[in-house]
Structures are given as C-alpha cells and as structure tokens.
Image: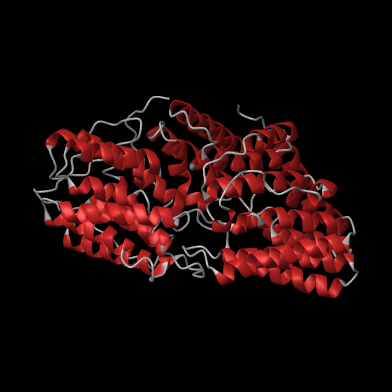
C-alpha cells in the first residue's frame, strides 16, 4: 500500500458530541512553527518534532517519534538509541527511549521496564537539552518514573499528565505536546466515569490538530482510542478508514481500525485489518529473527478470531486458533498472554461447545503469568460455563473458585493502570456462578447473580486489549431468561447486548428466537435477515 497525502475531516465530531470539553486553540510563533503540509509523508505517517539536536538526526528523530505514536515501542526505542549514538549530546533521544517504556493504554511497566525507563529518563536529564521546551518534555517523563518504588502507577501517570498539561500552556504553539497530552488524558481517564469526560476532551484536542496534520499517526490513532466506546464509536469511523493507509509500515496501525470496526459490527473490514496486521507483524519478526510469536500478531489474531466467529467462519476461526497456539514462545507481554488464553476460550464458548470449554487446558505459552493473572481467568471462565451448561456443578464450582482466586490475586496486588481488571474478573465470577446456581436449580439466585454480573460489566467496560468479553454477561443473562421461558424479558437483554456489541451472532440468534416466542414476528424476521446477511460475508483474505 502506498502512502499518499490524505485530506479529510471528522464531520461527525459536532459540538454536541464533545459537549463540556474546553476548546483548544492552536497557536503558532516563529520559533516553533510547524509546516506539516511541506513535511514528506512516510510509511509511518508524517511527524515533525522540532529539536535542538544536530540537524543530521532530525529526520531520524521524527521517524522514531512516528513509531512511538503507533505504539511500535521496541522499534522506536532502537531508533531513539540510534539518534543518541549519532549525537551523544541529544538528551531528547533518551527522552524518547524513556517514553517507549511507558504504555499509557496497555498495562503498567514491568519492574524491568520501570528500571530501563527510569535509567533513560535520568540519562536524558543528565545530558540536558538545548531549549526550555525540550527540558519540559524531559521533566514530564521524569515525573512518571520518580519514586516508582513507593508511588502507585496511577499517581505517577497523573503527574506525567499534569506536566504535559503545563507544557501545552507554556508552549501553546507545540502541537506534539497537545497530542501527547491527549494520550495522557486517555491513559488516566477514570474507569468509573460514565460521562467519558477525558476521552471527549482528548478527542477535541486531536480533532483540532486534524486540519493541519491529516497524516499524523498519533492524531488518527488516538482519535480511535478516544472514541472506542459503544456510544462514541461512529465518531471514529473516518479515522479507522485511513489510519492503516497513513502508516502502512506499522502492524498496530494496520490493526487499530478494527477496534472501531468491531464496535460497529463491520466484520469484513475487521477481518481485512487484522489479516494485514498479522502479516506485517510476522514480517517484522522474521526480519529481526525473533524466535517468539510477536504480540502484535497475537493481538490481531484475537480480534480476527472474534470476527470470524461472528460471521460463522468456523474453519477460518480454527486456523486462527492453531496459528495462535503453535508456538509456546511468545512475546512476554500482557497482550500476548491475553490472546493465547482468550482465543481458545472464544472458539469453544462462541460455538457453545460446552464439552470443549469444560475441558479447556491452560495455555502452554511460557509467560510471566503472575504479571497478568486476569488473562488466565479466561480459561477458568470457559471451564466454569462449559461445566455448568453440561450440568456438572462440582467441576463448575471448582472453576468459579479459580476465578475467585484470580480476583484475590488482583486485590492483593493491584495491576494499576486506567482499567479495573479486578472488577472485570469479578463480573466473570458472578456470571459463571449464576450458571452454577442454575445447574443446581437455584434459579432466583441464578438470576440475581446474572443481573449483578451484567450491571458490573457494563460499568467496567472492556479493555482495549480485547475485542469483547468472551461471552458478555448481559447476553448470558438473556440466555438464562430464555432457558427459563421468560422470552419477552430475554429479548430486552439481547437487544441491550446488541446495542453495545453490534453484530454479535449469538445475541442475534438468541434475540430472534426470543422475539418469535414472545409473539414479535416482525422483529424476529428482521433479526433473521440480519443473521443471514452476516453469515454471508466473505473473509476478505
């Protein structure tokens, strides 16, 4: 795919959609004026980050920053180190290295990443920079790593965000500062804020940058993250349509549009996006002679598995699972761990292959599972649901207890970061316990547990690592109501599931059955037509 100059606007971004967000007005001055239209686009997009380092490293610094904006953290770190090698007096090169160890939207750094990031930030401070603006950048990332042994991740992330906020006010012409601020807002958005205030503000900041920087990878990338929520996803569709073309060399840029495609039930587009991302990630791994499956590929495979299952392409879904599990050596990241646990659980659960789900083995991948125990909750959840649906209450209860054990681990040693994995795992426990109660014919208890699970999961939302819950708790509540012959109530819950998860095949099927049984023949026909259309899509591969 060739990169070309793209001019576009997010027309749906109305004042109403971003109500309550303060306007950000771009300003320019002679010292740091950015001529983005004249900057040459590349296979990573167009980024121009003025620095006072040797003029010979400016283009390489821009490319390293472009990689950073597309979360190509390892390659970005290598590129910033190469800049430092060419200009040892460039403290901003080590700022860049330090930035690659802070992943605002993923998970807190591991102890090893914290150490490496802190050392890079200290090196940047020691070398210094030629301008006050650059020193402010270095101070901002230093705030994130300061006192990491005794200050929680959330507090340090907030300190970084506040420094970036101050930087934008001190240097109002600096567009890169505003873009990084938008990311910091997303990375520190309160998990329980239903208004999505910080996400909306980030979206407004980024939309304000769009007119002058239509090919900036960070602007488009972070817009997708800003609106990766059911009620906002349609606002990011224009960004999703172009991000992969803006940065075709980035596996993450190839994958990221599928977040929005998944939110909107655009399965053919999601499939194409993730096939491209997988191929790109594997090509980079081969070039680097990586002896482990890259996390970018596994992350894409999880979304690909989900899309194939929603379109009934079971043979393709099986191939995806086999590709995900064929190598026990994988990148030691939470995204890789989540994918290798979730993919086989999805494959069994979405097909209602309860026997396979009940006997699901734990992943063979060699990973530091203690760093992301919530990933293994996927296996326990599949076992619990599978066993309960088979009527094996004893095995199901054992699996529910294993989920409770994961929750206890998270309570004892919180993961930190902007997402509440503890409550997500608790929602999984409640949903699984509901089916255990049903297997024991305690249906009042089962319905109470199922409703609590659905309400909790709605509040927590989904993490960006996952295309969706293995089985949404509200869909499971609908299934339970349907089994109890309460189809009118089941239809309400299926419809609610489809509003937040458009195009979920099992929810469509359940809603069609319940609509027919509840005497809503017209709605049943509409749902059957939607199912037939969805099952008729091609893989796009």
Q: At x 37% / y 51%, what residue is drawn?
A: 101
**Quadrant assignment, res 462:** bottom right
Query: Is 117 in front, or is 199?
Result: 117
Query: Is 293 in front, or is 482?
Result: 293
Q: Quadrant of the N terminus?
A: top left
Q: At x 17% / y 62%, what residue is drawn?
A: 170
Residue 427, position as x, y percentages in the image: 67, 66
Location of residue 443 with respect to 5 vertically, above or below: below
Query: Is 505 in front, or is 447?
Result: 447
Location of residue 422 with respect to 313 vertically, above or below: below
- In the picture, measured across the screen, residue 463 lies left or right of residue 67, that is right
Q: How is the image coloured?
A: secondary structure
Q: Quadrant of the C terminus?
A: top right
Q: At x 84% / y 69%, what residue is drawn?
A: 437
**Quadrant assignment, res 35:** top left
- In the picture, measured across the screen, residue 310 lies left or right of residue 418, that is right
Residue 71, position as x, y percentages in the image: 40, 45
The number of callouts visible is 0
Location of residue 207 with respect to 279 vertically, above or below: below
Q: Is residue 477 visible from the viewing direction of this image?
A: no
**Quadrant assignment, res 316:** top right
Residue 479, position as x, y percentages in the image: 80, 59
Residue 362, position as x, y percentages in the image: 70, 49
Q: Is residue 390 visible from the viewing direction of this image?
A: yes
């Amino acid at each position: 795919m060739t990169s070309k100059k793209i001019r576009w606007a997010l027309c749906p971004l109305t004042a109403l959609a971003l109500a309550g967000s303060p306007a950000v007005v771009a300003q320019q001055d002679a010292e740091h004026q950015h001529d983005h239209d004249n900057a040459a686009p590349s296979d990573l997009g167009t980024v121009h980050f003025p620095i006072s380092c040797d003029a010979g490293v400016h283009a390489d610094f821009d490319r390293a920053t472009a990689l950073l904006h597309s979360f190509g953290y390892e390659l970005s770190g290598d590129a910033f180190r190469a800049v430092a090698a060419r200009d040892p007096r460039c403290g901003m090169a080590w700022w860049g290295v330090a930035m690659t160890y802070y992943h605002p939207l993923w998970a807190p750094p591991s102890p090893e990443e914290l150490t490496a990031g802190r050392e890079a930030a200290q090196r940047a401070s020691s070398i210094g920079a030629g301008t006050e603006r650059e020193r402010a950048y270095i101070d901002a990332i230093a705030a994130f790593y300061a006192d990491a042994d005794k200050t929680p991740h959330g507090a340090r992330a907030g300190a970084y965000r506040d420094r970036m906020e101050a930087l934008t006010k001190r240097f109002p012409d600096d567009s890169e500062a505003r873009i990084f601020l938008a990311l910091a807002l997303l990375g520190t958005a309160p998990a329980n804020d239903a208004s999505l205030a910080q996400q909306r503000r980030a979206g407004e900041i980024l939309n304000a940058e769009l007119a002058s920087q239509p090919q900036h990878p960070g602007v488009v990338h972070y817009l997708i993250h800003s609106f990766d929520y059911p009620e906002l996803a349609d606002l990011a569709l224009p960004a999703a349509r172009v991000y992969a073309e803006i940065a075709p060399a980035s596996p993450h840029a190839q994958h990221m549009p599928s977040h929005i495609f998944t939110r909107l039930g655009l399965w053919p587009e999601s499939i194409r996006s993730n096939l491209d991302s997988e191929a790109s990630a594997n090509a980079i791994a081969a070039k680097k002679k990586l002896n482990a499956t890259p996390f970018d590929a596994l992350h894409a495979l999880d979304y690909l598995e989900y899309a194939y299952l929603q379109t009934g392409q079971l043979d393709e879904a099986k191939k995806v699972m086999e590709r995900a599990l064929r190598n026990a050596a994988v990148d030691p990241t939470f995204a890789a761990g989540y994918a290798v646990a979730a993919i086989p659980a999805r494959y069994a659960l979405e097909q209602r292959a309860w026997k396979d789900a009940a006997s699901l083995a734990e992943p063979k991948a060699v990973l530091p599972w203690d760093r992301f125990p919530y990933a293994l909750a996927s296996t326990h959840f599949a076992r619990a649901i599978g066993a309960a649906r088979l009527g094996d209450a004893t095995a199901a209860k054992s699996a529910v207890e294993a989920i409770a054990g994961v929750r206890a681990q998270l309570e004892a040693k919180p993961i930190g970061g902007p997402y509440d994995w503890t409550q997500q795992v608790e929602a999984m426990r409640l949903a699984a316990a509901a089916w255990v109660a049903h297997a024991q014919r305690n249906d009042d208890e089962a319905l109470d547990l199922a409703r609590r699970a659905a309400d909790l999961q709605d509040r927590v939302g989904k993490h960006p690592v996952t295309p969706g819950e293995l089985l949404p708790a509200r869909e499971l509540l609908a299934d339970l109501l349907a089994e109890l012959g309460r189809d009118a109530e089941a239809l309400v819950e299926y419809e609610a599931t489809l509003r937040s998860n458009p195009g979920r095949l099992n929810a469509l099927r359940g809603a069609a059955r319940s609509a027919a049984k509840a005497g809503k023949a017209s709605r049943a026909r509409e749902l059957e037509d939607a199912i037939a259309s969805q099952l008729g899509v091609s893989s796009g591969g």
